């Protein structure tokens, strides 16, 4: 079941994110985030415009997706958002990422958003395939921007224009 995240979900959200950090070259973070950092992040999201959703199985959070402002200090970009998603490594390959993505895109289509952006590392082929499945295309990349443990990777920007009726 997918639902709006609550503060009691933050431990699970942070644990899932830190799995990706510890895996290496999945995020640009090199150290796990603290729960205090996660709380600050969560407090910068609102349930109406920039929600965080969790995927629960029974009472366990096994995935999450967030909608965040893209360059929030630039008013001309107010209708562009960033989408991020993570699934517990014990549940990869179960279709949870696809369900979360569909839910997030449905939310964005009903909100005042025109473009959804995903920012990732080019070695994350699974995420690239998932985004392409939902109609995202590459919008740009910064070659060798990611430098981690002596390796370089591209920072990849993918986007999807939402179908918005003309006004």
Image: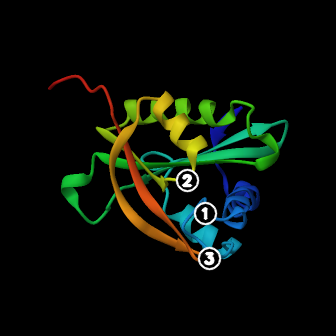
- Looking at the rendered image, the disc whose residue lies closer to the viewer, 3 or 1, is 3
Residue carrying label 3: 149
User: Splitting the image into 4 quarters, where does residue 149 fall?
Assistant: bottom right
Residue occupying the point 55% across, 35% down: 130
Q: Which of 143 and 163 is in front in this view?
A: 143
Q: Residue at x 18, y 54 (%)?
A: 76
Asked if residue 124 lies left or right of residue 56, the reply is left
Judging depth in this view, the residue of 166 and 154 nearest the camera is 154
**Which mark, residue 123?**
2
Answer whether labels 2 and 1 touch (C-beta < 8 Å): yes
Quadrant of the image containing the C terminus? top left
Q: Is residue 87 shown above or below 152?
A: above
State the image quarter where residue 13 is shown.
bottom right
**Circle 1 sits on which residue?**
25
Earlier sequence position, callout 2 versus callout 1: 1
Q: Earlier in the sequence, mark 3 or mark 2?
A: 2
Which residue is at a point 50% across and 28% down the rendered structure image?
A: 133
């Amino acid at each position: 079941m997918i639902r709006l995240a609550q503060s009691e979900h933050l431990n699970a959200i942070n644990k899932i994110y830190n799995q990706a950090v510890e895996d290496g070259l999945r995020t640009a973070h090199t150290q796990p985030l603290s729960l205090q950092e996660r709380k600050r992040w969560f407090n910068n999201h609102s349930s109406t415009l920039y929600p965080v959703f969790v995927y629960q199985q029974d009472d366990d959070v096994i995935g999450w997706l967030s909608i965040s402002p893209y360059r929030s200090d630039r008013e001309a970009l107010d209708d562009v958002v960033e989408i991020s998603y993570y699934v517990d490594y014990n549940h990869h390959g179960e279709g949870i990422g696809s369900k979360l993505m569909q839910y997030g895109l449905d939310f964005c289509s009903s909100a005042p958003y025109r473009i959804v952006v995903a920012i990732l590392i080019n070695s994350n082929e699974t995420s690239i395939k998932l985004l392409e499945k939902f109609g995202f295309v590459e919008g740009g990349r910064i070659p060798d921007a990611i430098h981690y443990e002596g390796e370089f990777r591209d920072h990849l920007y993918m986007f999807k224009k939402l179908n918005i009726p003309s006004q």
